[in-house]
Image (cartoon, helix red, strand yellow):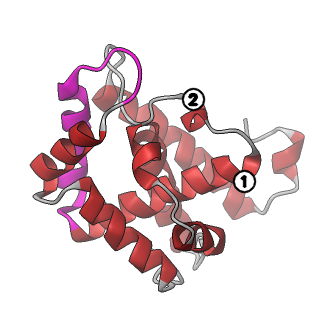
Amino acid sequence: FVVLSQWQRAQDIQRRSVVVHELTHAGMSGLFGGAYRYSTSLSEGIAQYEEELYTGRAGYYRDLTDLAAAYRGGYDSAARWRSTGVLWGVHGSGAVSLAYNDAFAITRILIQHHGGFSAFRKVVRGYLKVRLTNGSFTQAQLDRIFRSATGARFTQASDETHAWVIAGGWHTPL
């Protein structure tokens, strides 16, 4: 993957961070399992978070300027976190990029403000407990998963994340 021509032009830190991202997916496969569906944002959020931890050691942080603008315009994070579709079922590189960044930002707030990696693992178990085999999660299921794992509904974590991103809290590495 990292020997593709598009990655040869990237900085060394970027190439290595992609490896961290993909290894996180591989490591998480044991937690997620294969029998039931889980949120695309859950999977991509933790991979982005680990990638950010890695690049943050070198002083880099993810630029969330576009996400801040989308949040100000009413971006629907819950729709992304309910989705189980490949690339959230959205089309176009801009929409996909926003979904990746939203997944990262909400995962960061979940871990940093709502119980750490223990809460993240509880959210994983909550998604799997629903035993969804097709389609997407409902808003009620999403809120129940987050409330059970963190004591707060998804809407609260999302609102906190939107405020944090809009305020520019992301201008520091993890």
Residue drawn at x 34%, y 14% as measured from the top left? 133
Q: Nearer the viewer, residue 100 or 154?
A: 154
Question: Looking at the rendered structure, which numbered label has been put on residue 94?
Answer: 1
**Could you tell me how far apart the alpha carbons at marks 2 and 1 are, in whole angstroms?**
15 Å
Question: Looking at the rendered structure, which numbered label has been put on residue 86?
Answer: 2
> Helix or strand or loop: what does disc 1 sit on?
helix
Q: Main secondary structure of the magenta part?
A: helix
Q: Nearer the viewer, residue 167 or 57?
A: 167
**Side of 22 relative to 130 (left or right):** right
Residue drawn at x 51%, y 84% as measured from the top left? 168
Q: Which residues are magenta?
A: 114-136
* Image position, residue 28 (x, y; %): 37, 35
Evaluate whether residue 99 shows in this view.
yes
Q: Quadrant of residue 62?
A: bottom right
Query: Which quadrant would the C terminus be assigned to in this image?
Result: bottom left
Image height of 106 relative to 36, above or below:
below
Q: In the rendered structure, does residue 44 fall within the stretch colored magenta?
A: no
Q: Nearer the viewer, residue 54 or 124?
A: 124
Residue drawn at x 33%, y 32% as measured from the top left? 137
* Image position, residue 145 (x, y; %): 19, 42
* Image position, residue 107 (x, y; %): 37, 57
